[in-house]
């Protein structure tokens, strides 16, 4: 498969169109399988919900690339006597965007619903703040008897959001965190395959990052690799004042993270590959935890040397996340060159 912006956009539109909240990622795996090189070995681990793919020999893989597959969503916790459905968050949804928002509830069949909200004419300022999770009710237009034929306690719900093309190679949609990282891994595998790469690399499409990181914990325990690079998304420059971080810029390349959690050698190696191969990149600093799977993988078993690369993203954990397709392509090429480079650099 030829990796270019059109390929990446088509891939991301399909990935973002799939549900796959934490613990229910299976829906995404078929899409991933369809886009990976056919000569890769695929494994599905039922005990933790991960999907792994291997270029070369699984037992000889010394390098692991990870991207979490799950996206934020909701779960049904109750249905009241009038048929309104109460939801609770699965992951860190931005509750400021929820009022009046359309959702898809994935019951015995998919049905639409709208988050209930008080009209501004009647609120008198009481409901001007972010909706509280305790008040997250959804109107599906059905009575209690009707909706209970379709929806059960524990069923999941996701944003109703169709990915759209913006100007200047940008797209918007729900779930780009972290389907952008998943796309980067898929593109990397195809680039390596086209290069005739004869090394051994493991690709971990991990589960449950948005809740407790269980996929990375168990995936890290299972891997033979001693070096890993996690691919996620991170904050991009936007009109708001993003306190507490140094945001990246859309279209300026992947964000290489510098953190005490990460291995300095791997971080330097990633930056060196970008410099040698003229791949644009940006530096991101988190002095302690990174808030990604890198925090889990770096302490797995006796320790895995870990680096972190992020695709810049605006409006995280909303239905309208925004990325630049170029950054996904740059990230994929960085990973491929890093694998070909050997996955390390001397101090």
Image (cartoon, grey):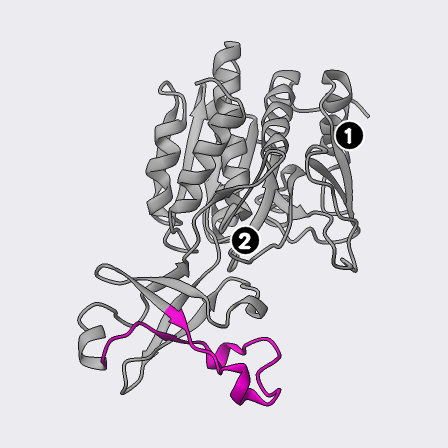
Give the quarter of the figure containing the C terminus: top right
Q: Residue at x 53, y 16 (%)?
A: 199
Please give the residue where the numbered disc 2 appears in the rendered image: 320
Q: Position of residue 190 (x, y in %)?
A: 48, 21
Give the quarter of the figure containing the N terminus: top left
The magenta stretch is 114-143
Q: Extreme top residue here?
A: 196
Vertical arrangement, residue 96 with respect to residue 170, above or below: below
Q: Nearer the viewer, residue 204 or 185?
A: 185
Vertical arrangement, residue 289 with respect to residue 227, above or below: below
Q: Secondary structure at mark 1?
A: helix
Q: Is residue 173 magenta?
A: no
Quarter residue 171 falls in: top right
Report the magenta stretch's main SS. Answer: loop
Q: Position of residue 300 (x, y in %)?
A: 58, 45
Q: Secondary structure at mark 2?
A: loop
Q: Nearer the viewer, residue 294 or 28?
A: 28
Density class for disc 1 (Cα within 10 Å; few <14, some 14-19, many ≥20) is: some
Residue 80 in view here: yes
Residues at marks 2 and 1, CA–CA distance in whole angstroms: 33 Å
Vertical arrangement, residue 338 with respect to residue 154, above or below: above
Q: Position of residue 166 (x, y in %)?
A: 56, 41
Please give the residue where the numbered disc 1 appears in the rendered image: 268
């Amino acid at each position: 498969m030829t990796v270019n912006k059109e390929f990446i956009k088509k891939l991301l539109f399909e990935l973002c169109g799939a549900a796959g909240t934490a613990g229910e990622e299976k829906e995404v795996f078929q899409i991933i399988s369809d886009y990976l090189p056919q000569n890769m070995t695929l494994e599905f681990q039922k005990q933790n919900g991960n999907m792994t793919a291997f270029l070369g020999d699984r037992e000889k893989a010394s390098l692991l690339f990870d991207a979490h597959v799950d996206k934020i969503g909701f779960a049904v916790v109750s249905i009241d006597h009038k048929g309104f459905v109460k939801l609770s968050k699965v992951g860190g949804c931005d509750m400021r965007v929820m009022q009046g928002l359309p959702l898809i509830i994935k019951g015995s069949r998919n049905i639409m619903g709208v988050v209930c909200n008080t009209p501004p004419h009647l609120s008198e300022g009481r409901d001007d703040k972010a909706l509280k999770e305790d008040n997250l009710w959804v109107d599906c237009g059905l009575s209690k008897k009707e909706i209970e034929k379709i929806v059960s306690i524990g069923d999941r719900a996701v944003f109703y959001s169709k990915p759209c093309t913006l100007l200047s190679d940008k797209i918007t949609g729900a779930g780009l965190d972290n389907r952008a990282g998943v796309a980067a891994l898929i593109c990397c595998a195809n680039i390596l395959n086209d290069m005739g790469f004869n090394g051994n690399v493991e690709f971990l499409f991990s589960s449950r990052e948005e809740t407790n990181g269980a996929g990375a914990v168990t995936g890290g325990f299972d891997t033979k690799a001693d070096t890993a690079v996690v691919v996620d998304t991170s904050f991009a420059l936007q009109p708001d004042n993003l306190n507490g971080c140094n945001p990246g810029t859309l279209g300026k390349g992947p964000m290489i993270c510098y953190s005490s959690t990460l291995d300095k050698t791997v971080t330097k190696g990633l930056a060196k590959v970008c410099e040698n191969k003229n791949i644009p990149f940006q530096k991101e600093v988190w002095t302690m935890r990174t808030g990604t799977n890198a925090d889990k993988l770096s302490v797995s078993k006796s320790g895995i040397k870990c680096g972190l690369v992020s695709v810049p993203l605006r409006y995280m954990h909303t239905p309208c996340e925004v990325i630049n397709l170029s950054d996904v392509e740059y990230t994929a090429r960085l990973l491929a060159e890093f694998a070909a480079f050997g996955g390390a650099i001397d101090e």
